[in-house]
Amino acid sequence: MSQLTAADLEHAIRNVPDFPRPGIQFKDITPVLADARLFAASVDLLTTGFAPGSVDAVVGIDARGFIFAAAAALKLQAGFVPVRKQGKLPFQTIEQSYELEYGSNTVAVHVDAVKPGARVLLIDDLLATGGTAWAAATLLKRLGAEVMAVSFLIELAFLKGRARLGEHTVRSLVVY
Ligand code: AMP
């Protein structure tokens, strides 16, 4: 287990103003990934309280969630499952749409990605309005899985995403 803390992660996260659009402060996690100790610490902290074998799958959200979820899956001796943007997965899928400020988005998962009753940990890099994670968690529930927790590296608390995930155990490491 690493000695590094969430404060060390916070120092490494880079703010990129006006990306990808004016007015957005993009939280760039690539400096965390590029540092072996910080990357390991982020995975340790995202999986705190979960022993190896305690979940059947770690589910990652397209695209940066894949990076942390895949590493967490290896650590927890669990499978890895991708939730992807619509149209990216090759096999039969179920889909879930969610509302954005303007319009909507849709995410998808393979119909056989998890077995009914599977215990899953859902991971993404960042919680903003919570729509993406809500849709991913809803897909998992529709497949009969039990979402044990939803873990994020970063939470933008002013966007109130946690409220949208109401029924779930939500944890985040660095809160803005
Ligand atoms: P939301 O559905 O609003 O919670 O948005 C979360 C998704 O959008 C995550 O997959 C994030 O990777 C991405 N995202 C939203 N806002 C930001 C931001 N300021 N910086 C980096 N990624 C973001």
Image (tube, helix red, strand yellow):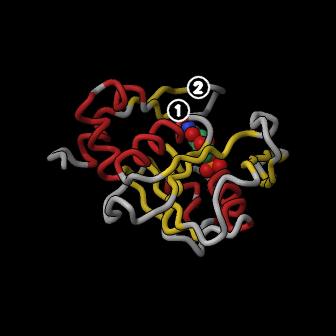
| Residue located beneath label 1 in the image | 26
Look at the numbered disc 1 and say if its residue's Cβ is closer than 8 Å to ligand 1. yes
Residue lying farthest bottom? 167
Q: Name the residue under label 2.
A: 19
Q: Do the residues labelled 1 and 2 touch (CB within 8 Å)?
A: yes
| Mark number displayed over residue 125 | none
Q: Residue at x 59, y 25 (%)?
A: 19
Q: In which quarter of the image is ligand 1?
A: top right
Closer-to-camera residue (15/87): 87
Where, by quadrant of the figure, is residue 14 drawn? top left
**163 left or right, relative to 43:** right
Location of residue 81 in the rendering, given as x and y in whole percent from the top left corner: 59, 47
Q: Which residue is drawn at 81% across and 53% down?
A: 94
Residue at (49%, 56%) from the top-left corner?
157
Picture quadrant of residue 102: top right
> Mark 1, residues whose alpha carbon is within 10 Å: few (<14), some, or many (≥20)?
some
Identity of the residue furthest to the left in this view:
3
Assign a secondary structure to mark 1. strand
x, y (%) of residue 145? 63, 67
Circle 2 Cα neighbour tier, 10 Å, few/some/many (<14 / 14–19 / ≥20): few
Give residue 68's position: percent from left, percent from top.
44, 41
Distance from Cα at disc 1 to Cα at disc 2? 6 Å
